Amino acid sequence: EDQVTQSPEALRLQEGESSSLNCSYTVSGLRGLFWYRQDPGKGPEFLFTLYSAGEEKEKERLKATLTKKESFLHITAPKPEDSATYLCAVMPGGTSYGKLTFGQGTILTVHP
Amino acid sequence: DAGVIQSPRHEVTEMGQEVTLRCKPISGHNSLFWYRQTMMRGLELLIYFNNNVPIDDSGMPEDRFSAKMPNASFSTLKIQPSEPRDSAVYFCASSTGGIGYTFGSGTRLTVV
């Protein structure tokens, strides 16, 4: 069974204080690892897809990296508007229809 | 593009009543997914369709839950009879090519 574990459950940062979120996974062949951002009362919003170990992707203050067992979401010099829940999900290989298994998420709060 | 459209946004119903949630996927997307989100269990996949055909309904909790996709632009998730433990946020998402989902804004269901 595919499993995704995210840590920490909650993270409080001061504006400008860089940090990382962790996503550990076990999956039967990884087709892709996905990061989403979810704001209160809204649906998850797609951020990144990583396909193979060693791959990195960046978007503004966010950078996602991938190894064979985990992924990190690095947040550089965060701002209050980066406050949200960040979700990690895996798509197993051999699945033609894009089924995703999600972690529980990390609630990020950035204080001004 | 208007994105994935879900209705209603909020639903409050009495235990035992029938509830129908609706979803319009993004035009051109050939996969549609229904998820349920709770604090305890996070995002759980209930059922997904590919080209309007149900592929995996193993996440549907009980026979009280049913889903249909009569055409490429519309899907419903029905709960009959509803119970208080069904209270959750229900998300619909669509995708094409397994690249990543686009989620709707969700339906917050409260069963009293």
Image: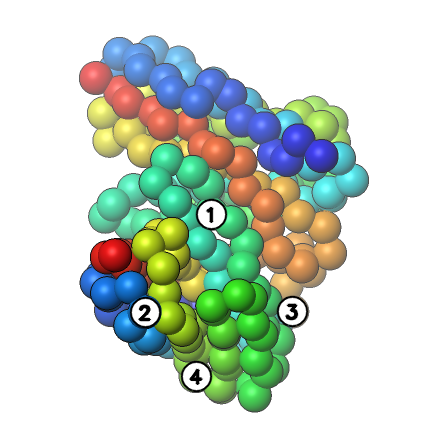
Front residue of this view, candidates A101 and B59: A101
Name the mark on residue A69.
4
For this view, does B30 lie left or right of residue B112? right
Circle 4 or circle 1, nearest the eye: 1
Task: Find the distance from the CA under tag 2 to the CA under tag 4.
Answer: 29 Å
First along the sequence among labels 2 and 3: 2
Going from the N terminus, do you reach mark 2 or mark 4 first? Answer: 2
Which mark, residue A94?
3
- Parent chain of label 4: A
Q: What's under tag 1, amino acid-wise?
A: Pro
In the picture, the quarter occupied by the C terminus of chain A is bottom left
Q: Are marks 3 and 1 in contact (CB under 8 Å)?
A: no
Residue A16 tag number: 2
Chain of the residue under the numbered disc 1 shown in the image: A
Q: Amino acid at mark 2?
A: Gly
Question: Label 4 to label 3, Cα distance in Å?
Answer: 18 Å
Q: Residue at x 62, y 56 (%)?
A: B100
Q: Position of residue B7 (x, y in %)?
A: 51, 21
Residue B77 location (% of width, % of height): 50, 27
Instruction: Kindly check if marks 4 and 1 are in contact, taking CB atoms under 8 A apart as contact.
Output: no
CB within 8 Å, label 4 to label 3 = no
Q: Residue at x 54, y 59 (%)?
A: A47
Q: Is residue B34 above or below residue A88?
A: above
